[in-house]
Amino acid sequence: MPLTTPYVAARASDKAPLKSELTIEYGPTGPRLAYTTRRPNDRDAHGNLWLRVDESPDNPGRVLYDCMHSTRQRRCMEGMLCQICAQPADRDKQGWLFIDWRRPDSPPTWPERSVTSMPPLCAEHAQLSLRQCPFLRRDEHVLLRVRKPHLYGVSGTLHRLTSNGWVSSDTGYLSPYNEPRFPGMLASFLHRELRGVTVVDEP
């Protein structure tokens, strides 16, 4: 059976912005990273600048199952949409449906209070993911119902300002909303903290 293409999956032809598209923007709190040409959805409500991904609809390239498309991941996480079909994720009295797995930075209470970048799922595609996803077959994972999947923060690439402009430093850096925002952050993924977790055997 061919693998289903997840809505959040990136494509080989996706392109990140060039360094020349980034500039310095001055505001009340000082300089911050910005695009030379601004768009309405460049920043979220917390002021984080988001990665733009240029797509090639006519020639999308192969599916990168181990990479997520930044814009589509953000859309699913904000709207609690299924990461596979982009329809509303499944929710019952125990909460929304997620799949999570143990990571080196997982809390001792895992899966309770786990911080994840993986959007929720609908019941149909949770079952499909458990059958088809090679990454789930390799790692310890659990199927969860989550009553309180709180928005936690963003992760992305940090840039530091030098005399020659912005220079990227750390990648995959997690910036919680309850801590000061980094003016040089280029956000790639939105994260939720899973609270009120119940491990379930089936969707």
Image: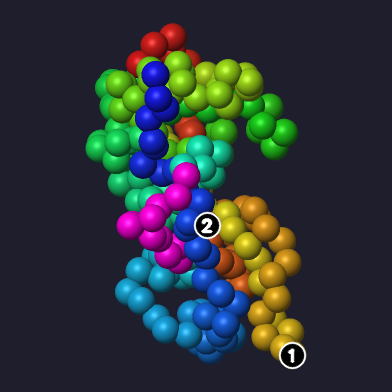
Q: CA distance from mark 1 to mark 2?
A: 25 Å
Decide which of tag 1 and tag 2 comes sooner along the chain: 1
Please name the residue that numbered disc 1 is placed on: 163
For label 1, the crowd category at 10 Å Cα-Cα, with few meaning under 14, some 14 to 19 and many 20 or more, is few
Q: Residue furthest front?
A: 59
Please name the residue that numbered disc 2 is placed on: 188
Residue 188 seen by the camera: yes
Looking at the rendered structure, the secondary structure element under dot 2 is strand
Vertical arrangement, residue 189 with respect to residue 3, above or below: below
Amino acid bearing label 2: Ser
Is residue 41 one of those drawn in magenta?
Answer: no
The residue range painted magenta reads 52-62
Q: Residue furthest top?
A: 201
Looking at the rendered structure, the secondary structure element under dot 1 is loop
> Which sits in the foreground, 16 or 196?
16
* Apparent side of residue 142 relative to residue 86 in the rendered image (left or right): right
